[in-house]
Image (cartoon, grey):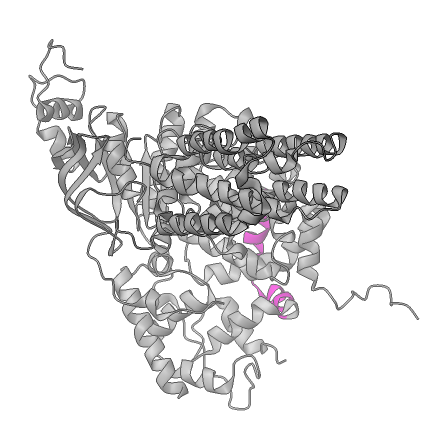
């Protein structure tokens, strides 16, 4: 790689107009070449040296304060997926899920699976924590940004479903049974809350879906020992529901980028 | 070094950064908070004045594309706002500070501004420098790594201003930004606004008349959803006479245009 | 056997390593970084601003920001140049300084003395600019090159270029367009 000639360097330092494309070439080169920068320092006149010295004198007192600590990269990355408000709810999901797994182990076989019963409603709480205006202090600020909308919905929903998936996998591993079916009702309830939320608001949607969960899943399980809807054979229905809800979410994704007119 | 793409240097497609015609925004079931206004705002600092409940916040929210216009047309930076179209590109060039802006208490100032920079889809290499610059411009450089919950109200609002300016927006929308700032800070803030207003369109909603007089090149008076006056602060002062209510010429102009009468109980 | 004392490892450029150490609070490393980059920065800024007071102010703000935010860079995008980063900070501080002032303290055209033509044998910077690009740039009118330099080399946006050069935005865009067209024609 060639270096800047003495002649050009002297002209550059003096502030003269360099011919043709030399200025471009010189500036681009100096940004990359430490050697030429050192030569420039040598060629610079006393006015530059005084300037540099004066700036350092003004700078020194401020260096007593230490530089800012390094940013915590993993924490920053995590915040892209779940807001701090969601964290307590996600921990609750894990705790309740773990309890359900434990109960299933204790009451092995004699009762319908707690995990299967609880897994649909657990993500509803997480979704509510992600998008309820009352719970999320930064709701308006977030809604006004470019990233608001489908990308943020996908990220937060993934964050909400991950603990549920973990619970299901743990249960499956412990019982040796394939509890993969359990993810479908969870997915359906999560997307259902979001889809309904685009019409009536997430808080109402969550309440409605919890009510549906109680009515259609809990009550039959308690009264009759099982709910028809939780039989593994119903998986096409759940899958269809997920597809429909996802369609609504995509179609009405604008609501996640705006405030409702009532606010 | 960076590449310059054609779109960036194409001739401007708009004459005004913010252009509205017959803009109406409904809030709630029956109320038209913004009732048919025409706006043409270019670079500079525009003050939005008006009584509480006049619809200022609704207007600012609509300009921030957070509320959809009910009627009329709105164009921001030449692009039509309020449709179902993807507004991401437009929003990257807007900065917004809501009146009641919420924040996560455990974030530090730097983390908060960085998080918002990420939400605004700023290119990753630019973020550290831009965040530092925004924090220094609002005077929070020595508190940059303190948690937000340890800061006073005025400092938190300044952190909010920092996130609004971090992406060097072409349109800056501030709703009551000086709440909680002491007079010295308000002075510094006005200098910052004038600096930004050199080449960006800044809209500041405020009820503090002295803010308007000092910082704004242009004043918009808003009442009951309608635009009552638009002009320079001097024009506003000229609209008032000795018989109007107010301690300063601008206040007198304000009350003259809004029809306030001394002693009557209109709040 | 082993590395000679005083020979720095060629793997990592020096300035990045200094910046990383400065991020941990190493004032000596920061001082060394300053020593190596401040003269260059001063000269480069002075070519864009005639007022030494502004240059001093901008430099002080820049290095203070570098000291404070060094951690963010060091932990940031790998492979970025520390010197390039210092320049992006400095040039934006310069634009802000111009925004704050009503007049533009950039060197008036008459003050810039044209350099005497170099001897024919004198080599310029062989290899830094491809010959064709260099030729194309040479054909550009100086005001077009100035705008292109501000946008491409300094990395400024249209609005920032307008402030730096004291031109209306429309003029900046027009000149940039003409420059791009001229470059494309010259290179084809």
Residue B146 horizontal/vertical position (percent): 58, 31
Camera-side residue of A218 and B119? A218
Camera-side residue of A261 and B66? A261
Q: Is residue B215 above or below residue A39?
A: above
Query: What is the tally of numbered marks visible in this picture?
Result: 0
State which quadrant residue C4 falls in.
Answer: bottom right
Q: Which residues are magenta?
A: A36-57
Name the residue furthest right: C1
Q: Is residue C188 a member of the stretch shown in magenta? A: no
- Would residue B254 be seen by someone viewing this image from the given angle? yes
Q: Magenta stretch: dominant SS?
A: helix
- Would residue C56 be seen by someone viewing this image from the given angle? no
Name the residue furthest front: A224
Residue A82 horizontal/vertical position (percent): 55, 41
Q: Is residue A16 above or below residue B64?
A: below
Q: Is residue A191 left or right of residue C126?
A: left
Q: Is residue A56 a member of the stretch shown in magenta? A: yes
Camera-side residue of B218 and A150? A150
Q: Residue at x 40, y 52 (%)?
A: A247
Camera-side residue of B187 and B101? B101
Residue B125 horizontal/vertical position (percent): 54, 56
Residue A66 horizontal/vertical position (percent): 66, 38
Name the residue furthest bottom: C121
Screen quadrant of the C terminus of chain B: top left
Q: Is residue B32 above or below residue A156?
A: above
Q: Is residue A135 above or below residue C38?
A: above
Q: Residue at x 33, y 35 (%)?
A: B190
Q: Residue at x 13, y 29 (%)?
A: B237
């Amino acid at each position: 790689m060639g270096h800047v000639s003495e002649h050009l360097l002297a002209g550059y330092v003096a502030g003269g107009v360099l011919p043709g494309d030399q200025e471009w070439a010189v500036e681009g080169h100096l940004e990359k070449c430490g050697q030429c920068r050192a030569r420039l320092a040598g060629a610079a006149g006393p006015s530059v040296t005084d300037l540099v010295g004066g700036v350092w004198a003004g700078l020194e007192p401020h260096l007593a304060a230490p530089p800012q600590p390094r940013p915590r990269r993993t924490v920053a990355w995590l915040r892209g997926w779940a807001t701090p408000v969601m964290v307590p709810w996600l921990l609750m999901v894990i705790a309740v899920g773990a309890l359900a797994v434990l109960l299933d182990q204790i009451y092995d076989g004699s009762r319908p699976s707690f995990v299967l019963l609880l897994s649909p409603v657990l993500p509803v709480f997480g979704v509510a924590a992600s998008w309820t205006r009352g719970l999320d202090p930064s709701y308006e600020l977030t809604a006004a940004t470019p990233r608001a909308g489908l990308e943020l919905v996908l990220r937060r929903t993934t964050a909400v479903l991950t603990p549920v998936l973990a619970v299901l996998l743990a249960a499956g591993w412990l019982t040796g049974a394939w509890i993969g079916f359990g993810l479908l009702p969870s997915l359906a309830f999560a997307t259902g809350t979001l889809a309904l939320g685009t019409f009536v608001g997430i808080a109402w949607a969550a309440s409605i879906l919890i009510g549906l969960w109680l009515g259609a899943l809990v009550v039959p399980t308690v009264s009759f020992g099982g709910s028809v809807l939780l039989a593994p054979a119903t998986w096409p229905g759940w899958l269809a529901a997920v597809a429909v809800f996802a369609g609504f979410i995509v179609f009405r994704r604008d609501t996640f980028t705006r405030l409702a007119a009532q606010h | 070094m960076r590449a310059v793409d054609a779109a960036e240097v194409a001739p401007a497609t708009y004459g005004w950064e913010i252009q509205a015609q017959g803009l109406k925004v409904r809030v709630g079931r029956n109320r038209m908070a913004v009732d048919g206004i025409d706006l043409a705002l270019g670079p500079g600092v525009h003050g939005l004045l008006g009584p509480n409940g006049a619809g200022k916040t609704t207007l600012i929210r609509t300009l921030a594309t957070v509320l959809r216009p009910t009627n009329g047309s709105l164009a921001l930076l030449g692009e039509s706002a309020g449709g179902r179209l993807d507004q991401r590109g437009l929003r990257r060039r807007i900065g917004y500070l809501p009146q009641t802006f919420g924040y996560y208490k455990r974030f530090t100032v730097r983390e908060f501004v960085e998080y918002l920079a990420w939400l605004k889809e700023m290119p990753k290499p630019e973020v550290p420098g831009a965040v530092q610059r925004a924090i220094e411009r609002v005077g929070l450089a020595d508190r940059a790594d303190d948690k937000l919950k340890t800061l006073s109200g005025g400092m938190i609002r300044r952190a909010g201003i920092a996130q609004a300016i971090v992406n060097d927006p072409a349109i800056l929308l501030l709703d009551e930004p000086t709440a909680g700032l002491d007079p010295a800070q308000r002075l510094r803030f006005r200098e910052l606004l004038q600096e930004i207003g050199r080449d960006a369109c800044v809209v500041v909603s405020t009820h503090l008349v002295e803010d308007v007089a000092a910082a704004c090149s242009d004043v918009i008076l808003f009442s009951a959803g309608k635009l009552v006056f638009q002009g320079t602060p001097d024009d506003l002062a000229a609209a008032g006479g000795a018989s109007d209510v107010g301690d300063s010429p601008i206040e007198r102009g304000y009350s003259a245009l809004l029809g306030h009468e001394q002693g009557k109980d209109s709040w | 056997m082993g590395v000679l004392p005083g020979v720095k490892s060629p793997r990592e450029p020096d300035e990045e390593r200094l910046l990383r150490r400065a991020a941990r609070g190493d004032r000596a490393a920061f001082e060394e970084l300053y020593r190596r980059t401040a003269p260059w920065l001063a000269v480069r800024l002075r070519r864009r601003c005639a007022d030494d007071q502004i240059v001093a102010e901008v430099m002080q703000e820049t290095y203070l920001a570098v000291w404070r935010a060094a951690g963010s860079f060091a932990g940031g995008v790998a492979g970025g140049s520390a010197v390039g980063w210092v320049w992006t900070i400095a040039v934006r501080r310069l634009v802000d300084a111009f925004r704050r002032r009503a007049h533009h303290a950039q060197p008036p055209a008459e003050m810039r003395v044209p350099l005497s033509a170099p001897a024919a044998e004198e080599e310029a910077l062989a290899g830094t600019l491809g010959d064709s690009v260099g030729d194309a740039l040479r054909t550009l009118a100086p005001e077009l090159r100035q705008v292109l330099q501000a946008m491409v080399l300094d990395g400024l946006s249209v609005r920032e270029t307008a402030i730096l050069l004291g031109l209306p935005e429309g003029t900046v865009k027009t000149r940039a367009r003409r420059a791009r067209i001229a470059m494309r024609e010259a290179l084809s």
